[in-house]
Each structure stands twice: as C-alpha cells, then as structure tokens.
Image (cartoon, rainbow, N blue to C red):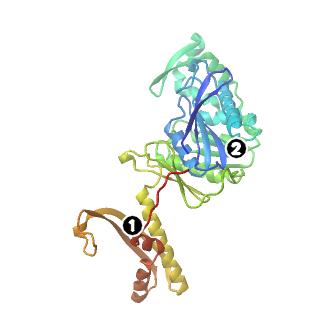
Amino acid sequence: MPSERFDLPNAQGERLSALLDRPAGQPAAYALFAHCFTCGKDVLAAKRIAEGLTARGIAVLRFDFTGLGASEGEFANTTFSSNVADLVAAANHLRQLYRAPAILIGHSLGGAAVLAAAAQVPEARAVATIAAPADPGHVTGLFRQHVADIHEKGEVEVALAGRPFRIRKEFLDDIAEQKLQQCLANLRKALLVLHSPTDDLVGIENASAIFTAAKHPKSFVSLADADHLLSKRRDAVYVAEIIAAWSERYLDMVPEPDMVPIEGVLVEETRNGKFEQSIIAGPHRYLADEPVSVGGNGSGPSPYEYLLAALGACTSMTIRLYADLKKLPLDRVSVHLKHDKIHAVDCENCETKEGKIDRIDRVVTLRGDLNSEQRAKLMEIADKCPVHRTLHSEIDVRTREAA
C-alpha cells in the first residue's frame, strides 16, 4: 500500500507533516517513530527502519516535530516538553484515524521523548529506544560552547549538522527539569534498549543507565560497529528486524481481517522510491526492489532474484525429499544460481538461434558421504523439481484489469 502523507495538529493548532507507512494488507500493529534532534521524518534511519517494519506487517507513523521539515511553527519556540506533546498529538491522531500505536520507537533524543510520552499513550505496550540519552540534557553537549551565551542573551543561533538553529533559554530551562529516571521507573511497558558500544555522540553508558532504571520486562541489544545515525543500511534493517521480532512477544500481532483472504500472492507498489514493491503471501510479507545502482532503494531482492530463489528453493527441497525417501547420507544441500542474457547462437541445445535468450546457471553442492552413483541420481532429481518443470513448460499468463 502506498505511504500516506497528511498533516496533523499539535497542541497549538499548528500543522505537523506526517507520513504513515503501511504494509500490504491490514497492519498487524501500529508504531509511532520519533526522530533524532533537529532531524526529520525522512532521515535515512527513520525511513529505513520504517521500511523494515512495514515489510513485517507493522505500520509506522513518522512526522516532523514542530519547526522542522515540512511542519509549521518555529523551532526556536520548541522545547523537549513540546516535542513530547507533539508525540502525544500524533498518537491521538493515529488513534482517531486507525488504531493507537502499540509500539513507540525513538532515535537519539527521540528515544528520550518516547520514554517521557509513554505514560500518555496507554495503548502502547512496547517502547524501543535507539541510541537514546539517559538524560535529555545530554543534547546541550552539541552546542556547549553557546550555553553560557544562551543563558545570558536569552536566544542564540547555533550550527547543528551544518544548519543554523535558534536555541532559547526556555529550551535549556525545560530540558533541565526533565526527570527521565522517574518515567523509566513508572514505565509499565516492555522496554527494548538498542545502542552501539562505539557511539561517539551518545555514549554506551546512557544505555546502561536507561536499562538499570527500568523495570522488567526489559531487553538490551548491542548495535556493534554502528554509528549514532545508523548511516549504514544494514544497521537500520537489523534494528527493524529486532524490534519486529521482539515486539511480537508483547503485542497481539494477529491482524484484524479487512478482506476475504486472497489466493496466491499480492504485489503492490509502496511509492517509497522508484521501484519498491510490497509482497504479501499468506502470513508472510516481503519487499521487492532494484539495486541503488539502477535507481532503486535496494530494500529487497529484485524480481529476477526472487525467480532464482524460487528455483533454488524448489531444487533444494526436491533433492532433500528424495534423499530422505531413499535414506541417502546427504548432510546438506545448497544451490547457487545466476541469471544472464546470452546470444542464442551461443546455446548449443536451444531451438532459438536468433537474438538473445535467458540463461540460468545453477550450481548444486551436495555435502555428505555419497558415492558417485548417488550423486548422479540426486543431480538428475534436481531437474525434476516443480519450478524447474514450470520454467521449461509452456506457461499461459492471463492478465486482466481488476473489477
């Protein structure tokens, strides 16, 4: 399902720019994501984590805090408390539109914000923090050389991540009054703390302080080698996988059906990038995409890679079934496949002799104490897998527009 963009009102009636990423089919749960200080809803970490969660059936609402991105208001007028109020407003809006968020996720200062907001979102049963400070005042370290001037002059322009922001004394006063330890002690929700031990912006000691102050159920996952902003795609994808798997223990993840279950596979564009597609097959959800090198997000296998995966999986399954049936000493089977286009004249056994044809190279590795006769038989069986036969048979693809 395409991502849905809309505005939601904050406590002052200003419009906050929001984006709801939804999976194919009815979401199993809704999550609310709070981005890092001075970032926006489209920062790579937020975008990639949302992609990963929607692929696993979880809808994600992310939005720009007041005065950031496409949201109305002046950043200079915001405080940590106003960010918490924005989060509560977003949760309320999501409750009115669809369903209240069951998962609260915060990155960096957004992590501290979701901890502070959690008590005001009663439906939330799980909270995940990513590289979060144990004390919101930690953020003043980003502009520590200006703190004295801000107290003296009341307002100073500072450069953060190469951009100018006006910070007021009210921001410093508000953040100094925050009591996150009390919020943690009274959280009464499952907590997941994700943090990199090599985070040079918010040290790992912050994760220790958050974890120690919270009561069970609580979990900690180390994001080894990740930087503070999760700039590597694999780190953001890993975070999404961990949050999705962990939250299942605490949430009712069975979606409410909104349609008669479909047969086959449903593929629908996400509108998240040029090529990305959402795939739903029974209870399973996936993403298909193209590599970044050709304009895609690289968020999932390409269509041809799924084709190779289907043939490889079927080959391996068929070999295993035969080996078990005949009680052959096959320990492990693996299949490596590649797809290419070749000139027809280069194919000795092909009927087509003009233009180009598709070639799939399939290399089967058989591990075990097998003799030559057994290996030959298993290789013969490989060509009898149903997908292999389908690819070699006449296929009638009927296409029509949905009613």
- Give the left or right position of residue 36, taking residue 399 as reference: right
Name the outermost residue toward the top. 153
Measured along the vertical axis of the image, is residue 96 above or below residue 398? above
Q: Position of residue 263 (x, y in %)?
A: 59, 61
Name the amino acid, label 1: Leu
Circle 2: element type = loop
Q: Position of residue 179 (x, y in %)?
A: 72, 30
* Residue at the image point whose x is 68% and y is 30% from the top: 89
State the quadrant of the N terminus. Answer: top right
Could one spot residue 183 in this view of the protein? Answer: yes
* Mark 1 and mark 2 residues within 8 Å of each other at the beta carbon: no
**Image label count:** 2
* Residue at the image point whose x is 66% and y is 50% from the top: 28
Give the class, few, some or many, for how many residues have Cα within 10 Å of label 1's Cα (few <14, many ≥20).
some
- Give the left or right position of residue 3, taking residue 247 as reference: left
Q: Nearer the viewer, residue 102 or 370?
A: 102
Where, by quadrant of the figure, is residue 10 drawn? top right
Give residue 73's mark: none
- Give the left or right position of residue 314, taking residue 361 as reference: right
Q: Which residue is mark 1?
A: 337
- Quick one: label 1 or label 2, which is nearer the N terminus? 2
| CA distance for labels 1 and 2 | 41 Å
Circle 1: element type = strand
Could one spot residue 198 in this view of the protein? Answer: no
Q: Nearer the viewer, residue 84 or 398?
A: 398
Q: Position of residue 34 (x, y in %)?
A: 61, 35
Measured along the vertical axis of the image, is residue 386 above or below residue 143? below
Give residue 102's mark: 2
